[in-house]
Amino acid sequence: MQKVIGEQKKAFMTGNETAAWAALAAGAEMMFGYPITPQNEIMHYWTRLAPKYGRGFLQTEDEISAGFTVCGSVQSGKKAFTATAGPGNVLMQEPFGMAEGMRLPLVAVIQQRGGPSSGTVVYSQQEVGLTTYGGNGEGFRIVYSTATHQEIYDYVIKGFNTAWKYRFPVFILGDGYQAKMREPLEMYNPEDRGIEMVPTYPLLGLGGKIGQDREPAHLCNIYSLEEELNEVVLKFAAEYEAISPELVEYEERMCEDADIIILSHGVVSRAADDAVKELRAQGIKAGYFRPITLRPFPEKQLREAIRKSGASKLLVAESAYGQLYRLTRQEIYGETIDMETLFMPAVGIIDFDIIQKVKSIL
Amino acid sequence: MIEPATPKSWYLPSKPHKFCPGCGHGIVLKALGEVIDEMEIQDKLIFGCDIGCSLLSWNFFACDTTQTHHGRTTPVMVGIKRSRPELVCVGYMGDGGGYSIGSQHLVNSAVRNEKVTLILVNNTNYGMTGGQMAPTTLPGQKTETTPYGRDVEQTGYPTKGPEFIAALTSDNAYVARATVSKYKQLKRFIKNALRNQIEGNGFSFVEVLSTCPTNWRTNAKQTWSFLEDQMEQYYPVGELKNPFGKGDK
Amino acid sequence: MTRTTVYGGVLIFSNHAARIIEAYVGEYASGKSELSINRALELKARGHRVTIVDLDTVEPFYTLRPISKSLEEKGLKVISQTQEDSFGLGETGAMLNPRARWALMNEGDIIMDIGYGVNGARTLNLVEGAYESEELQIMAVVNYTRPMTNSLERIKEYLISLGRVDAVVANTHLAEQTTTELIVLGNNQIIRAAAELDIPVAYAAVDRRWQDPKLEQQIDVPVKYIDRYMPAAMW
């Protein structure tokens, strides 16, 4: 595969650029997109780089089209991706649904902004519900929630492999702050780290002579009878559940003896990490739990952390009004731990906010 | 202090407005404001704006206004007009909101001869989001998503909106293209458009060729040159459909 | 006015004009805003009257806007969109303060922070009289750790794409992971690229955290230590 990263490997970049470079390094062949703040630089960088590496791009007429053009592209066997935010994410649920229904290896980078509606162009964690369970399906998606630029790079590359190996749509969930913040990270060619890129394969345009070498491919996402669809959904569910254990990723610190576990995801987990360290220094036994995959959710691992710590409280901190909270509650139903919440919809959360909240509830 | 003469339908607390220096929006909205005054429709005018630079007009008029979603100003105006036909509905959008994400709404409203007035400001780029390619970007023009110049092989030719709208509409629709370089004509076209709605004839659409020195990165002279020597050559100015009389050039 | 001296084979640029008018251009996140602020404050400390102009029309976030007040408190005149101006508008992208158009009408020195964008330094067209000004100096800021300028060839390609460049400012850093070795390696590559294109170099900018006389010995141009103001401009 083409090596795109040259000699100077450590770089100072913004999150958006990182996504574009990672897609390039992962061998993505096509990007389809539409302008919406705060992810525009993913397109700006892709359009500058693409011609130099023989990759393709189209700015479509809207996000619905961007999603469907990616669907078509992956059906034809090309590694394709898109990026969007906010209202664009809402529009893309239709094509994301087709990817779920037809098991297409679609990859999308989502840079959350304030919602609902046009909200703000800045930041939030208010697209968790949408990205995990949007559309009219059952949420058979894989969602990676990144917290650093290094993770954006790593998970975009991993995202393509996950998509092409398991054929569920994959989302790299960032936000406007990550998109624009500047940080050092190390870029690499996957093969230099022993990462083998899963080969792509077409679902249409399979080559050979129809009737002679092969039958025609007839792909659909609609069924005549309820029983047919029931069978399909159950089959997908079984597959999804079977692969979940190997897909789940999370981070856990100091939960062995915690009185309170702080649960957060994405960029807020950086503040939670600082908060836990500071609380411990002040003699408060706080623990840190961060789901990296929101789908599939590290439910077993969270239950285990709760059990072994004997913690009496679980504080969910998010820049939304309960989206992570509801997801968590449904996943750990039955746990009797007290769930507390720190909802700061559409604004950033700093360690001070979490520390104050912890002290007020203990 | 001498206050500049501004239309009565302008909302003074939001002035001076936020459009960039050299932007054509201010000219279009002045023409619209004067027409609203002259036709005395301020109290029943509903103004809808899109996302993009047109968003900066959301508190521009002393008229009832709603901001909508990107590309969805047209259907919102249609909803209002169909529910309250006595109101005068004006949808205001850019070339992206109109010809890109909003094109299906434009097409369908034209076909149904919706009695709304749509004013589309064409400055050949997506201004507010930082200067990406728009449907009306000219061949070879550099934008943030066409850093090497617009390649018509890859992205097609620039969209000639009024031309395709005119082909779709019925005979009692009004379709025109104006330019900020010809103010009196711009006003006349806007007036005809509103007249078409008020008299209950049908759909009215005015594209206005406008300037964006900020994203074009042009000084005053270069800005006018791009508008008059390039845009107006590519996009012919005039009335394409005028139920009130012969086409006016 | 400006002087270029040759030092160890490198053209060094220094600005001795009676009135300093400098426009900082460069790749996205190369350090233009930070260096503009430092330069403006440096001139202010010498007793000059200084206006700093925010000409970023693409990037809605990492600009001077949020820290305008604190810069004004330090005695600078700041021309940028303020938070209040953009309040209630949602999209806070390409907007320009009309005062920016007439920036050169202000007395004293003018420092312009030109945002990124496919049109590079052409943004100066938006400032009345900028290109005609004899005192205008276009300063290209380059950080070797930015992927688009992380090799000799890429730096040269980038500088050529900018069009007119009067001087280069080397600004290699990797935020908190910066090392002296990196500063020396990266900046020397930038200096070499500038030399191969016959463009003078003004200085190498180094965060005061990395202050080190050994560093100064290994870089062939004057080293200027800078302070960080931009982190306060983001959440």
Image (cartoon, helix red, strand yellow):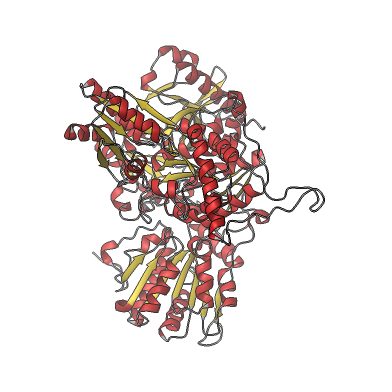
Q: Residue at x 46, y 34 (%)?
A: A248
Q: Is residue A106 left or right of residue A149?
A: right
* Residue C55 placement: quadrant: top left
**In this picture, is A310 found above or below A93?**
above
Percent across and percent down for residue C139 are 48, 35
Nearest to the observer: residue B194 or residue B232: B194
Nearest to the observer: residue B161 or residue C77: B161
> Which residue lies most toward the front here?
A227
Q: Residue at x 61, y 66 (%)?
A: B234
Percent across and percent down for residue C47 are 29, 32
* Residue C161 placement: quadrant: top right
> Does any portion of residue B198 appear in the rendered image?
yes
Nearest to the observer: residue A307 or residue C41: A307
> Does any portion of residue C42 appear in the rendered image?
no
Q: Is residue B209 left or right of residue B19?
A: right
Q: Quadrant of the C terminus of chain B?
A: bottom right
Q: Quadrant of the N terminus of chain B?
A: bottom left
Nearest to the observer: residue C28 or residue A42: A42
* Residue C233 placement: quadrant: top left
Percent across and percent down for residue A197 are 62, 33
Percent across and percent down for residue B78 are 42, 74
Q: Is residue A166 left or right of residue A279?
A: right
